[in-house]
Amino acid sequence: MSQCYNLQGRDFVTRVNEITSGKGVDVVYDSVGKDTFQGSLECLKIRGYMVSFGQSSGTPDPVPLSALAPKSLFLTRPSLMHYTTNRDELLETAGEVFANVASGVLRAHVNHTYPLSQAAQAHADLESRKTSGLEVNNNMAAVITKFFIASMIMWIAPLAILFGFNNKLLPGSTDLSPYSKTLLSGFLAVISVNIVIVFYIYMALKEPSDKHEPDPAFLAEAKASVNQST
């Protein structure tokens, strides 16, 4: 049985008891922490498992062992790193996740796509619980690559002047003194780099188009990881 329930401003313990006819649930996975911890314990059935794996609302208050006795409850606070202590465990667990993503069992929900210029707004929306998923699209790897390529190209003119090559754009440049060549090449280099920086900052902050379809490259990587782990 699957049920979705919005916890915002509601008594989730009462709702869980209604759904389960007062029996409670077998397992609670609680990532909220302080605000929901006690209620999560109350939702459990006899011999239920409380898995506390986060504390977005703060660290839960200390729990005496006697609080677990009335229902013989189990309490654990797992850390992901302890389940991926070596390469084999990492590949096995990652392979299971990627396999489910590739097969469509797990689907990443993109609630809204934000440009890099609205990163602060994205965080504000997440903190205020206005969104259940987000993507900050910055494409910085591609931007940095293009930046270096363009920078290298735009350095050609200054280097040509510095080393005395004939340049059709600057006729007579080879007649300049070494000191003048150095100053001129340095000036052009600074101008070139600044132009590239301004251009690619603009490109990085430009409003991206919404992208809600699965990335083919990601799916290919997921399948490769699954094959490697098996």
Image: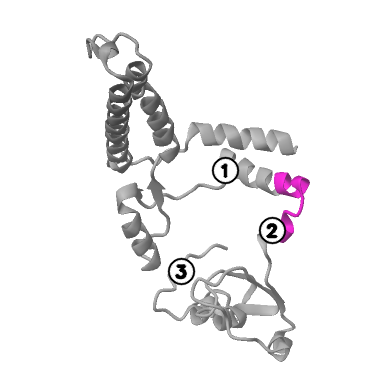
Q: Main secondary structure of the magenta part?
A: helix
Q: Residue at x 27, y 38 (%)?
A: 198
Of 137 and 65, the residue lying toward us = 137
Between the C-alphas of marks 3 and 1, the distance is: 24 Å
Q: Nearer the viewer, mark 3 or mark 2?
A: 2
- The residue drawn where x is 38% and y is 44% is 137
Which residue corresponds to mark 1?
A: 101
Q: Are marks 3 and 2 in contact (CB under 8 Å)?
A: no
Residue 9 falls in image quadrant: bottom left
Badge 3 density bin: few <14, some 14–19, many ≥20, Cα 10 Å: few
Q: Earlier in the sequence, mark 3 or mark 1?
A: 3
Decide: few, some or many residues near mark 2? Use Cα within 10 Å; few <14, some 14-19, many ≥20: few
Q: Magenta region: which residues? A: 81-92
In the rendered image, residue 85 lying in the magenta stretch gets the answer yes
Front one among 22 and 68: 68
The residue to which callout 2 is attached is 81
Q: Nearer the viewer, residue 184 or 1?
A: 184
Query: Whole-Å distance between the Cαs marked 3 and 2?
Result: 30 Å
Q: Is residue 230 above or below residue 173?
A: below
For residue 25, which numbered disc appears in the image? none
Q: CA distance from mark 2 to mark 1?
A: 21 Å
Q: Which residue is mark 3?
A: 5
